Image (spheres, rainbow, N blue to C red):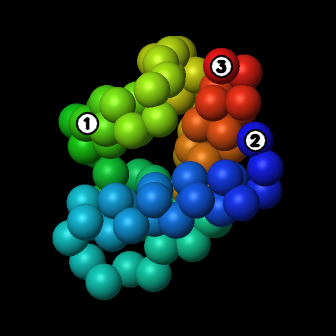
Amino acid sequence: MTASNYDEIMQLLCDRLSDLTLSEVEITPESNLIGQLSIDSIKLLNLIMEIEDTFDISVPINALADVQTVRDLVDLIYKIKSAS
């Protein structure tokens, strides 16, 4: 996977997160999913299911324990996609 693919994942995720957030918060790679974007566990699981369908990957639930920021989630998706 190339850097452009990483950027594509970041853009797709930021676009999707902007649809899920209630406020006009700017979404950056450093945005905290829970604290700043108010993404609760239900929204996160729905987002993960969409990601799995979009990228044809499987995201282990236990891998989400370390995910706090948008960048963390993109890194996880990129890592799983690169391994497949």
Residue 9 visible (yes or no): yes
List the residue tagged with mark 1. Answer: 46
Circle 1: is it few (<14), some (14-19), or many (20+) Cα within 10 Å? few
Give, as a three-letter code, the residue at label 2: Met
Circle 3: is it few (<14), some (14-19), or many (20+) Cα within 10 Å? few
Q: Quadrant of residue 1?
A: top right
Identify which residue, 34 or 16, lies in the foreground: 16
Q: Mark 1 or mark 3, which is nearer to you?
A: 3
List the residue tagged with mark 2. Answer: 1
Q: What distance separates the C-alpha of mark 1 from that of mark 3?
A: 22 Å
| Disc 1 to disc 2: CB gap under 8 Å | no
Please tell me which residue is depicted at 36% across the width and 61% down the height of the picture. Answer: 17
**Label 1: which secondary element:** helix
List the residue tagged with mark 3. Answer: 84
Left or right, 14 with reference to 8: left
Q: Which quadrant: the C terminus?
A: top right
Left or right, 75 with reference to 39: right
Give, as a three-letter code, the residue at label 3: Ser
Q: What distance separates the C-alpha of mark 1 from that of mark 2?
A: 25 Å
Give, as a three-letter code, the residue at label 1: Asn
Q: What distance separates the C-alpha of mark 2 from that of mark 3?
A: 10 Å
**Label 2: which secondary element:** loop
